[in-house]
Image: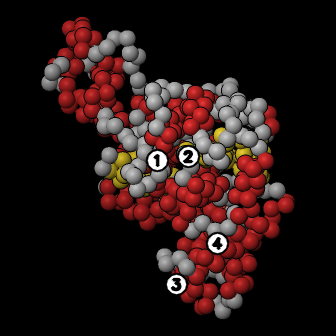
Amino acid sequence: MEQTETLLAALFSPERAPLNKAQLSVKFSISEAAVTQRLGEIYKRFSKSFPDLSDQQGAGKLKILQTKLIQKYYQLSQPVVATQASNSSPYPEEFISIIEEKIRRFCGRGFVFETFQQFITDNPHGYFTIVGDAGMGKSSIVAKYVSEHKSPCYFNILVERRNRPELFLKSIRRQLIDRYQLQNSEDADLPTLLAQVAGKLTAGDRLVIAIDALDEVEQEPGGNLLHLPKNLPNNVYFLLTRRPYSSEKKQLLVDVPVKELDLRDEKYVNFNHDDIKEYIRFVINTDSDYKDGLKNWIQTRNIPHTTFVEQVANKSEKNFMYLRYVLPAIAKGDYNDLSLTQLPDGLQEYYQSHWVRMGMEAKPGQLMENVLYILLEIGTPIPCEMIAGITKVDECDVGKVLEDKWVEYLKKQNVEGEICYTIYHASFLDFLKGKREMDSKRKIFKEVNQQIAEYLEEGML
């Protein structure tokens, strides 16, 4: 054992602190599932070279692998992840899919853009924050602005663990360096980067950095969220979004002009309602995926189009996420047994309605429940194969649950050649966390947690 320790210490820099799985996941912007996979590769790669490892039991062997091998292995084998897409796209590669998705059916919100433009006109620099409940279209507003103005951007995504200050700074730094050809700035902090860019702006130019979902940021208490600067150079602005929070939880204290546009404000009621109706009309008349199914549902019930638009708009409670779920569900025939008045009212009732229709309350302990719990508990993109391995269920059966039962609530993405799944939206995450049936103290989920631990340990041994 001592021989192995000495050999490992000689191979790897002793002054570097080892990283655990969670830290590796953050550092390299990959899922913990991908870290687990790499750990298995590490063991296969080094087990023959270090036969003493075979003398160790699970925990001891895992400790050696984590503390002595991981960091150097990643330094040597981790490919460089491009944060800037090819010349054909001005967006960071990591955000191309979310921007394209959000602007695909974008409608309205002119009052938001006009108010922000007026803020820029009236102030030499500053922070402009859009506040709204989950599903009110905040991310779509940012995506639309970025798509039209090619602004540097960052989308905090809780369900993908892409929500920490170091990831934000890394991405924005790369974007600013590439965009403005900054020299010797690879290690620069945000105030330094902004000062360098401000010095390059010509008359009439402005730098707007768009950041979505400040409420999803994860960092230690104290200081501004994402360590945003207290002061800004002239002609530098931030466009921010967040959910509402109480004044005592405010984490943006600055000495420059600020403005908040709260989408829930009474003065925006008519604007919001009109934008919701415009979105519904767009899907009915233009969206190739759903227009035929929606028109058929409306016609078979002899509902005037204007009545359908108005009543669904009212039921949405000014929530675009509700429409994102309900309109496709209607088009696919999920509500063929319901009338217009029987459609769920609001996003939370929609989630509950779907939960009941899936039989989640009538048949506790089934595979659908376990799959959701694993996605909720692990919290990072994971492949179907991993879920099947944890539950010890055939991968085909797990795939049917993912693709047939919960597909509209999940985001699929390619992680190192594997299709992985995460929960799509923070509002559904909140709904699940509030469900008694998903309580981690339940016996069934204690067993699932044990299965998760056993699976991850087996992958490293």
In three-dimensional space, the C-alpha distance between marks 1 and 2, rounded to whole angstroms, equals 8 Å
Classify 10 Å Cα crowding around label 1: few (below 14), some (14-19), many (20 and above).
Answer: many
Distance, label 4 to label 2, CA atoms, is 25 Å
Secondary structure of residue under mark 4? helix
Residue 8 appearing in the image: no
Most distant residue in the right direction: 266
In space, the residues marked 1 and 3 are separated at their CA atoms by 35 Å
Q: Tag 2, which secondary structure?
A: strand
Count how many numbered circles sit on residues in the image.
4
Q: Which residue is mark 2?
A: 153
- Spot occupied by residue 116 in the image (x, y as percentages of width and height): 72, 53
Which mark, by number, is residue 292? Answer: 3
Amino acid on which the number 2 mark rests in the picture: Cys
Residue 332, disc? none
- Of mark 4 and mark 2, the one earlier in the sequence is 2
Q: Is residue 392 left or right of residue 238?
A: left
Question: Looking at the image, is mark 4 or mark 3 earlier in the sequence?
Answer: 4
* Residue type at numbered disc 1: Pro
State which tag comes first along the sequence, 1 or 2.
1
- Residue at x 77%, y 66% (from the top left corner): 271
* CA distance for labels 2 and 3: 36 Å
Please give the label number shown on residue 279.
4
Q: Is residue 43 above or below residue 302?
A: above
Cβ atoms under marks 2 and 3 closer than 8 Å: no
Looking at the rendering, in which quadrant would you find the C terminus?
top left
- Of the numbered discs 2 and 3, the one sitting upstream in the chain is 2
Of 236 and 107, nearer the camera is 236
Rendered location of residue 55, percent (x, y)? 21, 18
What's the residue at 68%, 26% (across, down)? Answer: 223
Vertical side of 163 occupied by 275: above or below: below
Q: Relative to residue 181, is residue 72 drawn left or right? A: left
Furthest toward the left, the residue is 48
